[in-house]
């Protein structure tokens, strides 16, 4: 199967050998500030690698490493989890290493992920769940045509407090219409 790519980036399915790159991102407090996981050691990161493998094994998702086209630089990861084949929906996620923030990568890579979801995974709906306080991520989702659907109040408990989570989505026909222009 052809690897998804953009003008500047290549998406390569995450494999065990990527653990050092995943650790670099998911041990960085700037990356994980609004993320559900944080791994303080390389050994602890194995839990995330097992999660990626379980997604694939059970057909509930797929995640890719985001690499520069020359395969020299790992810049982050993105993919789908919570995939429900009957309902044709999944949750999207993406994180970047801090040195690559603010370079238009999200805007370039997300449409590639949308195509993978809508065309190859046969999704009708892609959802994004965001910590309501993560205004930077919320603005980014709105810029790439996600629709804000509402906020679930105090739905998660993290670091000793309840968090609100904002819900966003994009539908297959919305993406098709927007990508045609």
Image (cartoon, helix red, strand yellow):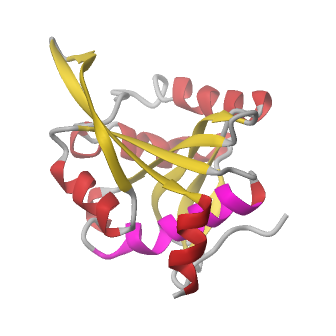
Q: Please tell me which residue lies in front, 161 or 176.
A: 176
View extreme (right): residue: 1
Q: Please tell me which residue lies in front, 37 or 119.
A: 119
- 149 versus 179 height, above or below: above
Q: Is residue 114 magenta?
A: yes
Pinpoint residue 10: horizontal percent, then vertical percent. Answer: 60, 71
Locate residue 32 relative to residue 63 in the image: left or right: left
Pinpoint residue 123: horizontal percent, then vertical percent. Answer: 68, 50
Pinpoint residue 147: horizontal percent, then vertical percent. Answer: 37, 55
Locate residue 131 relative to residue 106 in the image: left or right: left
Say which residue appears at 34% left-offset and 75% top-offset. 104
> Within the image, what quadrant is residue 140 found in?
bottom left
Q: Is residue 171 magenta?
A: no
Say which residue appears at 65% left-offset and 51% top-offset. 124
Q: Quadrant of the N terminus?
A: bottom right
Tally of marks? 0
- 85 versus 79 height, above or below: above
- 166 versus 148 height, above or below: above
Say which residue appears at 73% left-offset and 67% top-offset. 3
- 140 versus 152 height, above or below: below
Q: Which residues are magenta?
A: 103-119
Q: Please tell me which residue lies in front, 46 or 134.
A: 134
Q: Main secondary structure of the magenta part?
A: helix
Pinpoint residue 133: horizontal percent, then vertical percent. Answer: 15, 39
Locate residue 145 relative to residue 78 in the image: left or right: left
């Amino acid at each position: 199967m052809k690897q998804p790519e953009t003008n500047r980036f290549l998406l390569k399915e995450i494999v065990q050998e990527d653990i050092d790159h995943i650790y670099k991102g998911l041990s960085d407090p700037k990356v994980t500030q609004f993320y559900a996981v944080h791994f303080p050691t390389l050994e602890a990161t194995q839990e995330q690698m097992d999660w990626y493998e379980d997604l694939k094994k059970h057909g509930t998702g797929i995640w890719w490493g985001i690499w520069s086209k020359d395969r020299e630089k790992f810049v982050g990861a993105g993919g789908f989890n919570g995939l429900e084949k009957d309902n044709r929906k999944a949750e999207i996620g993406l994180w970047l290493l801090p040195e690559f923030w603010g370079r238009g990568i999200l805007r370039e890579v997300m449409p590639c992920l949308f195509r993978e979801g809508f065309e190859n995974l046969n999704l009708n709906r892609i959802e994004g769940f965001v910590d309501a306080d993560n205004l930077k991520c919320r603005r980014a989702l709105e810029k790439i045509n996600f629709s804000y659907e509402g906020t679930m109040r105090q739905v998660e408990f993290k670091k000793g407090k309840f968090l609100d989570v904002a819900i966003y989505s994009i539908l297959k026909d919305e993406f098709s219409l927007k990508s045609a222009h």
